[in-house]
Amino acid sequence: MKIELSVNGEDQVFEIDPSEKLITVLRREGYKGTKIGCDEGHCGSCTVLLDGEPVLGCLLFAACADGHELITIEGLGTQENPHPLQTEFVDKGAVQCGYCIPGMLLSAKSLIDKNPDPSEEEIRRGLDGNYCRCTGYVKQVEATKSAAEKMRGDS
Amino acid sequence: MKNVKEFCYPETIEDAVEILAAGDVRSAIVAGSTDISRTKSKAVERLVDIKKVGLDYIKKVKGDLVIGATTTMSKIVASEEAASYASGLVVAVASEIGSTPLRNMITMGGNITQLRVWSDMPVALLALDARINTRGPAGENSYSAEELFAKHPGQVLDNGELVTEVVFPAERSEFKSAYIKVNKTDDSFATATVAVNLEVVDGVCEDARISVGAVGPRPSFCADASEKVSGSNIDEDVFVEAGKIARESTVTTDNVWGAADYKSTLVERLIPRALNDCV
């Protein structure tokens, strides 16, 4: 079957199997920034934004994305022009192995888009569902807070 | 889900019911996609996405809180209508389900029909005496929460019978509620859940409903413990006694989130704690 959707602002048509998961299709189509971690809905490394909200690509049938807007990590920023979240994650040392970071950044983006001045508790809730086995989360919370400040123009 | 050949998107409830009830191949409902997509069924040949049939709503109807079957947990958490009902019990339960991305996917209908040992939302339905409305080939039907969870909902609902909405009754809207969930970490499935809903009139607890979940094969309404509390004064001894009664009447089973005896102790201890939170 075919699905029509927008990925990172570009209209796409993908040929899929009706029972395929979104993560499988995205990676096959070249969006390899999105990672497969636990593959059963716990770790968050497959997180993408569906109509602006974080969802898990390992659980969502690709067919469910038909007619929707997706954002993957490839849609956040580039090497030359990184998103403020990406800059802050690097500057604050929030990235070690990096496997969880695509999901973590997209969750953070979704949060800041809706709530430009999140409290620490709101950030922890916003990043909830993204497991990082390297850092212990403190730096990612700090980086999200400071990116939000930069995006508001406070510093 | 190896043998799925078709994925369809009905746009009305009638179309969805017709497709689900058609006997040609085995169909399965998709809403949030969190549970069904992990099912390793070889029998299912058609997936039916019901997100477009118009069941995404939260509304107050004559004091009832009515939540459509495809409404996500995140929408419930953000809902003022839900927060103002029964001191926010439904919101309290929804906000502790899964993680943020999972709450963006998990739906009201899915969390009750795809019943698992750890399912959270059923305790809210039991404590609030909710009704579950359905539409099937035989027309509309309605179940009390106790009827729906007396067995696995899959055994109660007919083939092709679709849960359309959950109705939390107006009578309990102004009652106080409390919810306690015990789980090993924030993201773990529940070891035990307790929900309480009651009215306090002149220092007397009226019409109490106590329910427990995650401790046994199915969530349950604690009828005897609820009866013990109903009509009693706000009294710690009565609350402790209700916990003991519920411990006796609740079947608990071992699983990776806790041993049966530990869960029985949780039931006994959490019920007085939830009752105290309520009064």
Image: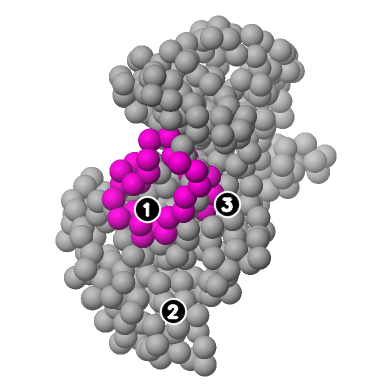
C-alpha gap between disc 3 and disc 1 = 17 Å
Determine whether, in the image, residue B117 is placed left or right of residue A77.
Answer: left
Determine whether, in the image, residue B264 is placed left or right of residue A65.
Answer: left
Write down the residue under mark 3. B67
Name the element at disc 2.
strand
Question: Are discs 2 and 1 located on one and the same chain?
Answer: yes
**Residue B207: image tag:** 2
Which kind of residue does numbered mark 3 sit on? Ile
Residue A116 % position (x, y):
74, 43
Which kind of residue does numbered mark 2 sit on? Asp
**Residue B148: image tag:** 1
* Mark 3 vs 2, N-terminal side: 3
Task: Report the coloring of the rendering.
Answer: one colour
Residue B75 % position (x, y):
61, 47
Number of dots carrying numbers: 3
Q: Vertical placement of B200 versus B155: above or below?
A: below
Residue at 25 percent of width and 51 percent of height: B217
Q: Vertical placement of A130 versus A98: above or below?
A: below
* Mark 2 vs 1, N-terminal side: 1
Residue at 38 percent of width and 49 percent of height: B119
